[in-house]
Amino acid sequence: DAGITQSPRHKVTETGTPVTLRCHQTENHRYMYWYRQDPGHGLRLIHYSYGVKDTDKGEVSDGYSVSRSKTEDFLLTLESATSSQTSVYFCATYREANTGELFFGEGSRLTVL
Amino acid sequence: GIQVEQSPPDLILQEGANSTLRCNFSDSVNNLQWFHQNPWGQLINLFYIPSGTKQNGRLSATTVATERYSLLYISSSQTTDSGVYFCAVESSGNFNKFYFGSGTKLNVKP
């Protein structure tokens, strides 16, 4: 368990509004990730971070931005939410040492009306 | 990026039966992991297995890196094994970026 908490866990919003999802970890892991999960697609990488202020794009980064000002927090922002961004969003961290495992938060369900 | 394909997409088993789930990938990998997503949506890491074979109770996994596939074996299945199984890979050319297959949805009936 990597002590990952996501907030909010559920959110309903309207098209065109900004939304920020927060991921907080307590294990001091360097790598953090944001994924979205949609039926038939598994988990797709949106953005990831390899340190404070160091981020990079994943497979489906259009319409999303991220920020990491502290090791423990990784924020995902939808500047202007669209209905196609309705999804379940998962944050993950990577334990580089030993077994190199990914650990996931409990997910944030976002509905854009 | 690397392509990850899982089969079968859906699987229905009677309790007590055995099953094999497959993960094929299109490039050499540094890291491969198997996950179970339970019916409540929680993702649990089952195995870290970039090569070789590992066992944990009724579950075991084998990765043949040279042939670019991994297998997850579930023996004597139980209803609590139901959920979706994902494999995730980190390609050798793209460090620390993990790509997932679409998953195998398993339903174990009592």
Image (tube, coloured by chain):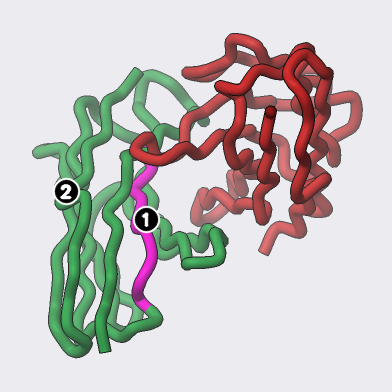
Chain colours: A red, B green
- What crowding class fits label 1: few (fewer than 14 Cα within 10 Å), some (14-19), or many (20 or more)? many
Residue that appears at 27% across and 34% down? B4
Residue A109 lies in the magenta-colored region: no
Q: Which residue is mark 2?
A: B7
- Callout 1, which amino acid? Trp
Residue that appears at 79% across and 34% down? A21
Work out whether disc 1 and disc 2 sit on a shared chain: yes
- Callout 2, which amino acid? Ser
The residues colored magenta run B81-89
Can residue B109 be seen here? The reply is yes
Can residue B63 be seen here? The reply is no
Residue that appears at 20% across and 27% down? B26
The quarter of the picture where the N terminus of chain A appears is bottom right
- What crowding class fits label 2: few (fewer than 14 Cα within 10 Å), some (14-19), or many (20 or more)? some
Which residue, as the protein is rendered here, is positioned at the far front? A113
Taking B78 as reference, is A83 left or right? right
Which residue, as the protein is rendered here, is positioned at the far left? B67
> Residue B48 at x, y = what percent?
40, 56
The quarter of the picture where the C terminus of chain A appears is top right
- Mark count: 2
Secondary structure state at the residue bearing disc 2: strand
> Residue A23 at x, y = what percent?
78, 41
Number of the front mark, 1 or 2: 2
Q: Quadrant of residue B109?
A: bottom left
Marker disc for residue B34? 1
Secondary structure state at the residue bearing disc 1: strand
Dominant secondary structure of the magenta stretch?
strand
Taking B78 as reference, is B42 left or right? right
